[in-house]
Image (spheres, rainbow, N blue to C red):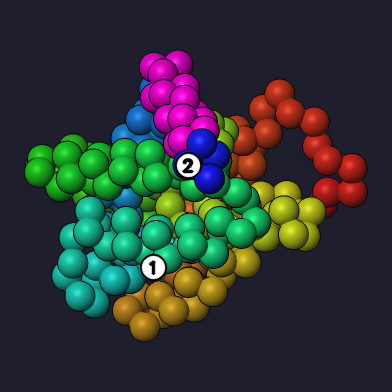
Amino acid sequence: MLSKTKQFVLRQLRALAELLRPANLAPMLLGAAILTFGLHNIHSRTSITEGGVLGLLLFANHWTGLPASVVSPVLDLLCYLLALRYLGAGFIRTSLVSTAAVAGCFKVWEGLPFLLPDLSAWPLLAALLGGVFVGVGVGLIVRQGGSSGGDDALALVISKLTGWRMARSYLVTDLTVLVLSLSYLPVQRIAWSLVTVTVSGFLIDRIQGIGRMRPAGAE
């Protein structure tokens, strides 16, 4: 029994060492920085929300005042417990690293003044640009086998169980959170948020699938 435990620990340490190689870690850090830059400088200032757990993060921040760097890992952990059954320990290991990167990047941006002008007066531009930041950032992280948060884990589980493309899987969680967001956002802002989640979902799907064959029967 002790020998098996030792072998398991050694395998996990080797996998973690491989994950932390610059070639694997750098894309995740870049993705985390891009994602959180957009959420902090665009979404949180323009009242344009995201779907999924990212939207829940903004929802919690609005109603409780808790900083994103605190709410993010708590929500992620709850979702990862669900994902463990379907996505395996390897996914969880990678996602814990990417989640720490997201929380760390949030902490950096929260300690700096806003680095983009307030786009509240131009909601369409904010929705499009915000969607690009989220789509590119999350896409880079998911492509490395991790997730930027619990919504990615949930979308990957839904995709695995149903065979849907990632864009459709995200839509399920996005619409649920956008309905909840009506509690503090006007309908017009939710409409702009639909633009954001459509753009981000499209980019995540494309970046995650670059160089990969589409599974037979996937929609």
Residue 53 or 90: which is nearer the viewer? 90
Magenta stretch containing residue 69, yes or no?
no
Q: Residues within 10 Å of mark 1 (few under 14, many from 20)?
A: many
Relative image position of residue 137 (x, y in whole percent)? 44, 37
Label placed on residue 173: none
Label placed on residue 2: 2
Label placed on residue 56: 1
Farthest residue in the right direction? 217
What residue do we see at 71% from left, 24% from top?
211
What residue do we see at 83% from left, 40% from top?
215
Magenta stretch containing residue 14, yes or no?
yes
Disc on the earlier residue, 2 or 1:
2
What residue do we see at 47% from left, 25% from top?
14
**Region of the chain picked out in magenta, as a range:** 5-25
Left/right placement of residue 24 relative to residue 66 reads right
Relative image position of residue 132 (x, y in whole percent)? 46, 40
Q: Amino acid at mark 2?
A: Leu
Q: Is the residue 81 above or below the residue 30 in the image? A: below
Relative image position of residue 138 (x, y in whole percent)? 48, 41
Residue 175 or 144: which is nearer the viewer? 144
Q: Nearer the viewer, mark 2 or mark 1?
A: 2
